[in-house]
Image (cartoon, grey):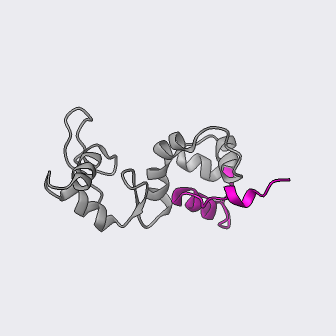
Amino acid sequence: MRDLSLFDMDDPEWLSLLRTEVERPGKSIASVAREIGMPRPSLSLLLNGNYPAKMGKKQAKFAAKVFRLYGADVFCPHVKKGIAKGVCKAHYTAPLTTNSAEKLAQYMSCSRCENNPNKQPASEGADHDQS
C-alpha cells in the first residue's frame, strides 16, 4: 500500500468555503449546489475529493460565485485565490503600466475579470473592478 500523504494537497479556498457552507446548520450538498448552480453530484464528488476531471474548469466557472456568496473576499482569477475587496479594487482602478510584467499581467487579467463592473470584452482589454 502506498503512502497517500505525498499526494495530499490543501483545498483551493473556494472549495474550503463550500465545505464550510455545507456543514452549516440547515444546509446540505443539494441546497448549496442549487445556490451556486452546480449539479449536486458534481458538488458531492468535489467535496469528497473524487471529482474525475480537472478542477480548473470548475474553478473557472464557480470560484468567483462561491466567494461572492460565501466569502468575505473575492476570488481573483489572476492569483487564483481570494483577495480583499479593497485590494481587488486597487488592482482594477490602477492605471496601465508597462514597467512591470506582473502589473501588466494583473491589469490584463482585471480587464476581463467578471468581478470588474467596468469589464471590457476580451478583445478590447480594459480595467478590473470589484466593489
Residue 38 in percent (x, y) is at: 58, 42
User: Looking at the rendering, in which quadrant would you find the C terminus?
Assistant: bottom left
Residue 11 figure quarter? bottom right
Residue 48 part of the magenta segment: no
Residue 79 in percent (x, y) is at: 38, 56
Would you say residue 82 is visible in this rendering? yes
Residue in the image at 59% along x and 46% along y = 34
Would you say residue 97 is visible in this rendering? no
Q: Residue furthest top?
A: 123
- The part of the chain drawn in magenta is 1-29
Residue 30 in percent (x, y) is at: 67, 49
Query: How many discs mark residues in the rendered view?
Result: 0
Residue in the image at 62% along x and 38% along y = 53
Closer to the camera, 101 or 73? 101
Residue in the image at 58% along x and 40% along y = 54
Residue 3 figure quarter? bottom right
Residue 89 in percent (x, y) is at: 25, 61
Residue in the image at 29% along x and 43% along y = 112
Closer to the camera, 27 or 6? 6
Q: Is residue 109 left or right of residue 23?
A: left
Residue 20 part of the magenta segment: yes
